[in-house]
Amino acid sequence: MRIRLRVLRKQLDSRAASSKAFIAESAEEHFLKEGIMQMVITFMAVVAGLIFSVAVALLAEEFIFGQVFRLFFGRQALRQTIPQAIPETKQKR
């Protein structure tokens, strides 16, 4: 009977030790994933802030000068080359 109790205690102790190690590993993984996710969210916030800043600057520029959007989105004259009638004798040179 005592031998059986000792065996059961050893099994319980080994399971407890392995579960503590598992909990420690999962906690490390959790903190690692949490840190990565926090960096990703910070990066997205910085990029969004930069885009918002450029948008506000363009809007202020448009209100002040009124020609920024005309510069980007205005119609541009198409440059087409008109084929010139060149005699065949001049083309061979």
Image (tube, rainbow, N blue to C red):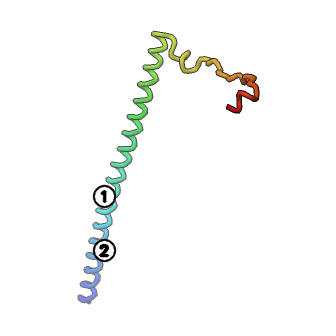
Q: In 3D space, how far apart are the residues under numbered discs 2 and 1 (Cα atoms)?
A: 20 Å
Q: Is residue 42 left or right of residue 87?
A: left
Q: Secondary structure at mark 2?
A: helix
Dot 2 surroundings within 10 Å: few (below 14), some, or many (20 or more)?
few
**Closest to the observer, 12 or 69:** 69
Residue drawn at point x = 34 percent, y = 58 percent: 29
- The image position of residue 38, as x and y in percent, is 36, 44
Quadrant of the rendered image containing residue 60: top left
For the point 28% across and 66% down, which residue is it? 20
Residue 10 figure quarter: bottom left
Q: Amino acid at mark 2?
A: Arg
Counting from the top left corner in percent of width and height, residue 2 is at 23, 88
- State the SS at label 1: helix
State the residue position of label 2: 15
Q: Is residue 93 left or right of residue 59?
A: right
So how many labels did they put on this image?
Answer: 2
Residue 70 lies left or right of residue 33; in this view the side is right
Where is residue 64 drawn, in percent x and y? 45, 10
Q: Nearer the viewer, mark 2 or mark 1?
A: 1
Q: Nearer the viewer, residue 78 or 37?
A: 78
Quadrant the N terminus occupies: bottom left
38 up-or-down from 80: above or below = below
- Up-down relation of residue 46 to residue 13 (above or below): above
Rendered view: 39 above or below 64? below
**Residue type, mark 1 in image:** Glu
Label whose residue precedes the other's in the sequence (2 or 1): 2
**Label 1 sits on residue:** 28
